[in-house]
Amino acid sequence: MECGIDIVEASNEELHPPSKPGMYQLDIVLKKGNNLAIRDRGGTSDPYVKFKIAGKEVFRSKTIHKNLNPVWEEKVSLLVESLREPLYVKVFDYDFGLQDDFMGSAYLYLESLEHHRTLDVTLELKDPHYPNHDLGSLDLAVTLVPKEGDFRETHQSLRLSDIHRKAQLWRGIVSVSLIEAHDLQPMDSNGLSDPYVKFRMGHQKYKSKTIPKTLNPQWREQFDFHLYDEQGGFIDITVWDKDAGKKDDFMGRCQVDLSLLSKECTHRLDVPLEEGEGTLVLLVTLTASAAVSIADLSVNILDDPNERKEILHRYSLLRSFHNIKDVGMVQVKVIRAEGLMAADVTGKSDPFCVVELSNDRLQTHTVYKNLNPEWNKVFTFNVKDIHSVLEVTVYDEDRDRSADFLGKVAIPLLNIQNGERKAYALKSKELTGPTKGVIFLEIDVIYNVVKAGMRTLIPIEQKYIEEEPRVSKQLLLQNFNRVRRCIMLLINAGCFINSCFEWESPQRSICALLIFVVVVWNFELYMLPLVLLMLLTWNYVLIASGKDTRQGDVQAVEDLLEDEEEDFDRDDKDSERKGFMNKLYAIQDVCISVQNALDEVASYGERIKNTLNWTVPFLSWLAIVALCAATLVVYYIPLRYIILAWGVNKFTKKLRDPYSIDNNELLDFLSRVPSDVQVVQYRELKVDPSHSPSKRKKNNPG
């Protein structure tokens, strides 16, 4: 169930607020609906309910599919500051891929409720535009209790803005492999289609790649959804035909009911498409949740010697081949922040903190009217990829709109010093420059090195919470300059080699000639990985001796990015002012493709360079292990046998495993290496000496 329950946590300013008029606890049981409106063509609806107070959404129920008399039996507890604001109840019909349909609304006037008594209430649903239409009713049980004395809310805060609602505690993982489709409907004039698939589970979304010109596409894509409801849920699937320059064509839909699938095993599903033609082939696996939790600072598992010993044993080298996907765990203590930006007109902010690791997101409570908040929360995540980046973002909560951004830090797990309480200077949203304030964190990472190395060679987990790509002149120019820098390195190397041919320096040319003759005369294939191994060793020696050449690259990229944020803002304003007409959609798609291609080329060029210059020592050591192994294999085994084994493996792979997902281990390895832009983004800013982890600033509201 994905709900938005507004439960207020005690802040450090108002840990024991005095009893005051207008502070009430409102307990509501959403029981059922009666004779609700028909909104789907099948003569039914998929209803869900929203509660709002003072324009702010405080609750959303689960969706009951294909039912005009749904039974929810969901309970929510709200903290109400004033009885003057009524509870606004709205019912919607859930339409995946489309805008949800309005099914009616009603008001519950809180001033009319008796205190300390549970009342059964029936709300007649109406449409303000058509007040005479009968849209059915909702049955509720409501209890209103005035709060007296100290008030501490013990429930977990699950109220989030729309962009964060999907970020809370989850109870399992739904692993979906999109294999293929058969006999799809032709949508183009050539009798074929360019199909892609959209998946939606609550607020989690995924879009597959497009397979051009086929009615029997093969995707072989795998991704994970988080399961919030122990009873299961539904995955809504739509198939579309990609059309350049106009709206994509709808090809059909289907739905997977997870409650019908057993856990801890893989199910092969051949799902026929409704409102279209053809069948989708899926592999679906439901697994139990990993350890993801929020606790107060006093509840710290790593401070318990027995717990720490058990965790260290779980990720010891002796258990390297037990549960390969469980690489490690990370514990994040979010202590406090200082000197935050004032986001409200009162000169204050209402900050809360969101901690993200890949697709796992958790958040603290909100500390109201404070620029120096203390959260004192402990977050625990399972690590599936040691190359993941921990992102900690501070937002300002707003009553009637989405939260305002206050600052952010990105910390690669491999850069973390265990047990060190540290002040991190907050950065801008693009992570390219500083913003106001610092945040104090203490992080511990425990992982198995063997599992981490093995997981490096499989595809990286895709984030399903990402912004849509957009056309940006500045980003296009930036990516072009990054590609140019990589190409200039090759050109300079070519010029150096050419200078040897031209005998510009006789000593250098003689040395080059002797090396060339010796290498060509004695060439063996094992020398190729050996050269890379020597290059890695040479760069390591340079770094160990204090001759670090990486700083120049970082400074160059910083100079490239310094005006990026300002140009992004200007591009946004121009886009809002001018807009895009339909006839320019095709041009936009081309621009985005070129922009992303330049970014991809530049990133991989920089990642190869950063592997060799020890930007991420773990990956460089892993490369050394792989190169040593490759050197020995090629040295002892004739090349023809290696090529034969590779070819046989390639030809028989699909026969041995028809549903295998293709991947390139080298590209998967390089995807873990940060590009130059990411190196800048993950680089820590210098903290003002006045901000010391051991120095605790007095928490005043200003």
Image (cartoon, grey):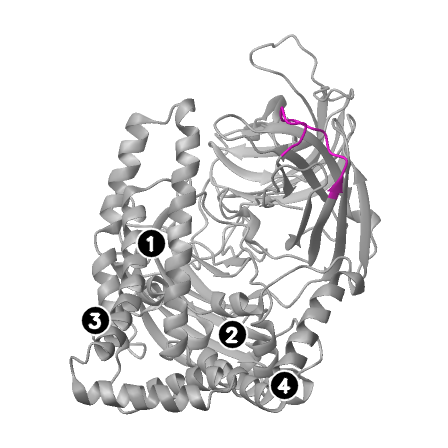
Position of residue 533 relative to residue 204, above or below, is below
N-terminal of the pair, mark 2 or mark 4, is 2
* Badge 2 or badge 3: first in the primary sequence: 2
Mark-to-mark CA distance, 1 and 2: 34 Å
Q: Indicate the amino acid at tag 4.
A: Pro
Q: Which residues are magenta?
A: 181-193
Query: Which amino acid type is marked by label 2?
Result: Ser
Q: Which mark is residue 430?
A: 1
Name the quadrant containing residue 45. top right
Q: CA distance from mark 2 to mark 4?
A: 61 Å
Query: How far apart are the two marked residues, 4 and 1, measured between alpha carbons?
Result: 50 Å
Residue 177 placement (x, y as % from top left): 70, 53
The residue that mark 4 highlights is 638
Label placed on residue 688: 3
Instruction: Look at the image and say whether residue 648 sits in the magenta stretch.
Output: no
Q: Are marks 1 and 3 in contact (CB under 8 Å)?
A: no
SS under mark 3: loop
- Judge from the rendering whether residue 304 lies leftward or rightward of residue 617; answer left or right: right
